[in-house]
Amino acid sequence: MHPSDVLFQDARQPVTLPVCDHYAGSEKLMRKSLALQLALGPVFDITFDCEDGAAAGDELAHAQLVGQLIASDENRFGRIGARVHDVDHPDFEQDVATICALAAERLAYLVIPKIHGSRQLEQAAALISRHASAAGRPDLPVHVLIETHGALREVWDIAAQPAVECLSFGIMDFVSAHYGAIPGEAMRSPAQFSHPLISRAKLEIAAACHANGKVPSHNVCTEIRDGSVVASDARLASKQFGYQRMWSIHPDQIRHILAAFAPEASEIEDAAAILRAASDKDWGPIQHKNTLHDRASYRYYWTVLQRARQTGQALPKEADGLL
């Protein structure tokens, strides 16, 4: 049996996604992103943006461009999604229908912004499923932006919906929704990790995702020039807040995010050695470096190897056949 079948017999196997989600809105930036993904490999996703990428009055043409690029041979790895307009926007269904009709089979996911609650998401997911099914893709994943009071209040119900694969925190809209009660500095570091209302929101989103086997995606870092800020934000998001993915809004941010979310080389080596020894013992308890391990720790180390592969790290020979 494959390790994933053995280790997750009694638990939901979590969704795994690339740790970086790179957003691009204009045609120029979308094509640049495609070229970079081709160079680096499928270690990051690309999200083509209809919400902020389309000029007013040009929404249909922009959605058509997004669909055409996703359907093209330039989408080498099938790891490109699209953010559509919010559910209340007049172009929401047009975005969904246009992109699905052109590219449903190659589309990695659709992102829905500004959801106000689980019922609204359920209706939006049903509409997406209808258009995707008509184009031959009944199981199209949905990613949801949590950036309103209502969405945060119902985040556990939102994470539990079957179509949902990933929840992202929209920090800027969330701060703005407090009408000055949260200072603007909380949109960036260090306050974004210390302000109680912001840290509460981040933790609630992460907890809801982990309880339902979904991926929590951390908000954008607005610092573009100083890579150390991007790296620091990504490390805190990963190690202190339990996030498994993070937005990028500039190509220079991608490598910093990949490095911050990657496991240490020593942990990768331990994970491979532990899982190889466990496999040789038919997944019974083992001892490694004077420490007892069983299926609980095996699940953890299996995710370490998953993250290593997702971030483009070299895997030890012992990892062969374990992923």
Image (cartoon, rainbow, N blue to C red):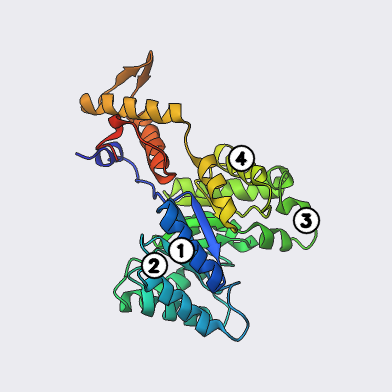
Quarter assignment of residue 108 = bottom left
Mark seen at residue 281: none
The Cα atoms of the two marked residues, 2 and 1, are separated by 7 Å
Image quarter hosting the N terminus: top left
Can you give x and y, in whole percent of width and height, for residue 221 in the image? 64, 52
Can you give x and y, in whole percent of width and height, for residue 215 in the image? 46, 51
Image point (38%, 25%), residue name: 270
The Cα atoms of the two marked residues, 2 and 4, are separated by 34 Å
How many residues crowd mark 2 within 10 Å: few (<14), some (14–19), many (20+)?
some
Q: Is residue 218 visible?
A: no
The answer to which of marks 3 and 4 sits earlier in the sequence is: 3
* Amino acid tagged 1: Leu
Disc 3 designates what residue? 184
How many residues crowd mark 4 within 10 Å: few (<14), some (14–19), many (20+)?
some
* Amino acid tagged 3: Gly
Query: Secondary structure under badge 4?
Result: helix
The mark closer to the camera, 3 or 1, is 1
The Cα atoms of the two marked residues, 3 and 1, are separated by 33 Å
Query: Secondary structure under badge 1?
Result: helix
Image point (37%, 72%), residue name: 72
* Amino acid tagged 2: Glu
**Label 2–label 1 contact, CB within 8 A:** yes
Disc 4 designates what residue? 236
In the picture as drawn, the residue positioned furthest to the top comes out as 290
Query: Secondary structure under badge 2?
Result: loop
